[in-house]
């Protein structure tokens, strides 16, 4: 029997697990944290307080993997916006026209997205169990060493193990009891958790494939090194930005609003409508965390539209910071990896959150795994689409004429937004050329841009 053990029950872990049920007899996810009893942020996912939008590549992959999940998200209050058709966007070169493209985004809180996905996934997640290392050697990984986290379920000697607690994504139910008593829970592939007594007895779990989905702070390179695997090459490119995010109460019938800096990295801001009649507002750059400073910062952006909107809205929580925004790529695929090991998600690639890519990369990776089976090369191909865009960011002195052409040409705008949304670009080179040579429209003023939307009238 083949058993896959996925380390980390974040989005990349849960979706990889869904994909791997098509290739293995048994798939189990180990998660060090505990999921909250509703769509609420959790400790193991500090970024869950911040804005998380899903772009088209991710929307399509997610719906392919878990049919109906996107409708469920929208029914639960998420908002779909076309880019730039339903978005008010002030780029470095000016305001975008309302041009419809194939690039959409879905905006909702991260906790809602995770909960709806987990409900659809129906994957067993053993919570409160932290992966602490790998077993095997440089040629083959044979399993995982685990430890409990505070409040976890594997404390004490085996005979004292109070219960192997698990959730079934499908019902959200919880069951405890001695491992041998846990008979009612079935993995998606039909095995009961009672088939996993080795975790409780030895602190080890045997696996034919171990998938590292423990996120940006993954310890997997160190675990592999302990087995004698040479160092995993890592490239880190600072993003130069911090985040400050606050929720407001506000109507859902407004566009997503984005005010970008002239040159990255610098001050920018976004406002997305999310479920529950709320907006999630993020300032990027070096935003202050006090009320007055946050509002002043919003007003000092290149356009005060976000400040004007939040001035009339009611705050719905504290201002939360995030400083961990560096771009990082771990090149697992270039190493001589042992058999039985795969890394996915933020463990492989993490890009500056302003690109809104990580969740889509997780979904697109899982979609490849579902079709092709596990393979580090396929993971790398998806990761690199996001990575190349993030690290190729034009900085000060970038080509202003290209920027203006993007605002003037619907074809070029579609090209840009399709790339950003991780779907194939348009490639209408004539339109691009025309726009760049002689077709540069007059840029929109702020008033013209805003008046494209009914809410402003
Ligand atoms: C501020 C911010 C904003 C972002 N905005 C967006 C956005 O708009 N759109 C987008 O697509 N992406 C966004 N991202 C990226 C997104 O959060 C990640 O790409 C996404 O969460 C997928 O990551 P993951 O599942 O690989 O890792 P994580 O989400 O970090 O999940 C890792 C999981 O592993 C668990 N874990 C960790 N160590 C262990 C261990 N030793 N044993 C067992 N379990 C362990 C953790 O508790 C966690 O549940 C943003 C990121 C940040 C920081």
Image (cartoon, rainbow, N blue to C red):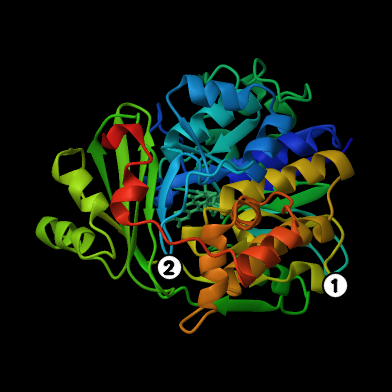
Q: Quadrant of residue 26?
A: top right
Q: Nearer the viewer, residue 162 or 26?
A: 26
> Which residue is under mark 2?
92
**Residue sitting at x 67%, y 45%:** 57
Tell whether 217 sits left or right of 48.
right
Above or below residue 137? Residue 128 is above
Disc 1 secondary structure class: loop
The reply to whether callout 1 and callout 2 are in contact (CB within 8 Å) is no
Q: For the view shown, which residue lies furthest in the bottom direction?
A: 397
Where is residue 76 drawn, in percent x and y?
Answer: 45, 22
**Residue sitting at x 46%, y 59%:** 354
Q: Quadrant of residue 293?
A: bottom left
Tell whether 413 sits left or right of 128.
right
Count residues near mark 1 (Cα–Cα under 10 Å), then give few for <14, some for 14-19, many for 20+.
few
Mark 1 or 2, which is nearer the eye? 2
**Residue sitting at x 63%, y 72%:** 437
Q: Is mark 1 within 8 Å of ligand 1?
A: no
Where is residue 430 drawn, in percent x and y?
Answer: 74, 61
Q: Is residue 398 visible?
A: yes
Q: Nearer the viewer, residue 249 or 379?
A: 249
**Residue sitting at x 57%, y 71%:** 402
Above or below residue 109? Residue 437 is below
Q: CA distance from mark 1 to mark 2?
A: 43 Å
Count residues near mark 2 (Cα–Cα under 10 Å), then give few for <14, some for 14-19, many for 20+.
some
Q: Nearer the viewer, residue 238 or 267?
A: 267
Label number found at residue 336: 1
Where is residue 212 drawn, in percent x and y?
Answer: 67, 55
Q: Earlier in the sequence, mark 1 or mark 2?
A: 2
Disc 2 secondary structure class: loop
Q: For the view shown, which residue lies furthest in the left direction?
A: 292
């Amino acid at each position: 029997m083949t058993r896959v053990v996925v380390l980390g029950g974040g989005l990349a872990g849960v979706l990889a697990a869904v994909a791997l049920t098509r290739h293995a007899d048994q798939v189990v996810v180990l998660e060090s944290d505990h999921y909250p009893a509703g769509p609420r942020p959790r400790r193991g996912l500090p970024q869950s307080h911040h804005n998380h939008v899903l772009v088209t590549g991710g929307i399509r992959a997610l719906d392919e993997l878990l049919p109906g999940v996107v409708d469920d998200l929208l029914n639960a209050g998420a908002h779909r916006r076309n880019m730039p058709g339903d978005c008010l966007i002030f780029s470095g070169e000016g305001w975008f026209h309302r041009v419809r493209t194939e690039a959409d985004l879905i905006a909702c809180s991260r906790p809602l997205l995770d909960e709806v996905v987990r409900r659809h996934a129906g994957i067993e997640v053993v919570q409160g169990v932290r992966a602490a290392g790998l077993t095997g050697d440089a040629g083959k990984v044979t399993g995982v060493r685990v430890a409990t986290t505070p409040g976890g379920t594997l404390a004490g000697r085996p005979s004292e193990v109070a219960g192997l607690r698990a959730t079934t994504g499908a019902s959200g139910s919880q069951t405890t009891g001695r491992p041998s008593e846990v008979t009612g829970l079935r993995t998606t592939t039909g095995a009961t958790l009672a088939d996993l007594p080795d975790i409780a007895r030895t602190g080890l779990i045997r696996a034919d494939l171990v998938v590292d989905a423990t996120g940006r702070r993954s310890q997997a390179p160190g675990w592999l090194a302990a087995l004698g695997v040479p160092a995993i090459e890592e490239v880190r490119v600072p993003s130069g930005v911090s985040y400050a995010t606050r929720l407001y109460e506000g109507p859902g019938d407004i566009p997503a609003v984005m005010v970008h800096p002239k040159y990255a990295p610098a001050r920018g801001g976004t406002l997305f409508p999310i479920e529950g009649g709320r907006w999630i507002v993020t300032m990027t750059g070096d935003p202050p965390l006090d009320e007055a400073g946050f509002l002043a910062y919003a007003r000092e952006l290149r356009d005060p539209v976000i400040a004007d909107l939040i001035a009339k809205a009611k705050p719905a929580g504290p201002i939360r910071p995030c400083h961990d925004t560096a771009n990082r790529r771990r090149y697992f695929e270039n190493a001589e990896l042992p058999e039985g090991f795969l890394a996915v998600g933020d463990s492989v690639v993490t890009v500056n959150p302003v690109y809104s890519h990580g969740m889509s990369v997780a979904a697109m990776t899982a979609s490849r795994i579902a079709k092709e089976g596990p393979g580090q090369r396929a993971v790398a191909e998806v990761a690199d689409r996001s990575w190349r865009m993030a690290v190729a960011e034009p900085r000060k002195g970038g080509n202003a004429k290209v920027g203006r052409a993007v605002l003037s040409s619907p074809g070029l705008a579609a090209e840009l937004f399709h790339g950003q949304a991780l779907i194939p670009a348009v490639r209408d080179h004539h339109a691009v050329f025309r726009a760049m040579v002689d077709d540069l429209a007059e840029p929109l003023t702020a008033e013209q841009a805003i008046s494209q939307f009914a809410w402003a009238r």
